Image (tube, helix red, strand yellow):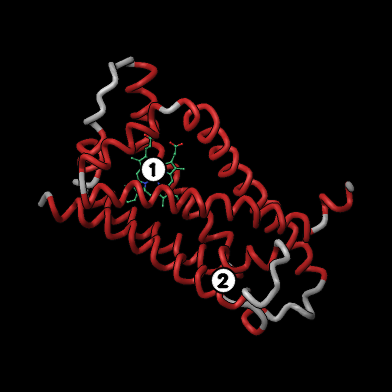
Amino acid sequence: MGGLIKSSVAKKFAMALSGLFLVLFLGQHFTINFSSVISPDTFNEWSHFMGTNILVQAVLQPVLIFGVVFHFVMGIVLEIHNRKARAINYVSYKGNRNSSWMSRNMIYSGLVVLAFLGLHFYDFWVPELVHKYIEGHPEDAGRYYGELVEKFQDPIRVILYVVSFIFLMLHLLHGFSSSFQSVGWNNKYAKGLRGFTVAYAIIIPLGFIFIALYHYINNL
Ligand code: HEM
């Protein structure tokens, strides 16, 4: 068992499972945020539900935070493991001849997404915690849309977000499709699934870019 946990296959499996979980979160997060472009009321309603529902706050949110930290820590561990293996097997490691640029740079695209999360938490999550638990304001179900739009009035922030979403796309382009291989999914649906993962990896980050630019341009 100890050997299995230490093995690179087990690490890849854990990375894939946590990554798939984060991809699910991303789809849900995108759907709620995209509603801000269509209907401010719907965005307020959904955000209020997510921000006050006890199940979301006490179960989903801690699981999500754990998933993010786990994926990040395991990613670093896997990278160190791979570097060591490469140093030993350098003869068979032929860089771009047997792997894609994106697969070789997952650690860097991942670190950019992590840096983005730092900024993103500072922008949205920290003010939310301060609002609710430190300043103790009464619940106001109509405040979310205004808070979101206000953040996207700063062009520097919009640029940082857009650049981060491009790195998110690169990360997902390799990560999402290879995650199914890592969990052993290899049957007649594998090819179709790959098409879906590529489409998802492109459409979701482009959608996030659209949301950020929309709120910036809409309020010029
Ligand atoms: C235009 C794009 C985005 C917008 C407008 C946006 C908006 C928000 C908002 C308003 C919150 C606060 C939720 C709360 O009140 O607690 C939030 C939280 C969060 N966002 Fe985003 N987000 C965007 C993109 C992303 C991306 C690309 C990721 C991941 C790579 C991400 C990850 C998170 C996480 C992990 C949280 C904390 C969730 C929680 O409340 O537990 N967001 N986002």
Q: Which residue is mark 2?
A: 193
Determine the secondary structure under disc 2: helix
Viewer-side residue, 16 vs 94: 16
Viewer-side residue, 215 vs 154: 215
Disc 2: CA contacts within 10 A as few (<14), some (14-19) or many (>=20): some
Q: Which residue is mark 1?
A: 120
The nearer-to-camera label among 1 and 2 is 2
Outermost residue on the left side: it is 220
Q: CA distance from mark 1 to mark 2?
A: 30 Å
Direction from residue 161 to residue 21 in the image, left or right:
right
Residue 218 percent location from the top left of the image: 13, 53
Determine the secondary structure under disc 1: helix
Q: Residue at x 50, y 70 (%)?
A: 196
Viewer-side residue, 220 vs 93: 220
Residue 168 percent location from the top left of the image: 45, 60
User: How many numbered dots are placed on residues in this image?
Assistant: 2
User: CB at mark 1 closer than 8 A to ligand 1?
Assistant: yes
Instruction: Name which residue type carries label 1.
Output: His
Outermost residue on the front side: it is 188
Instruction: Name which residue type carries label 2.
Output: Leu
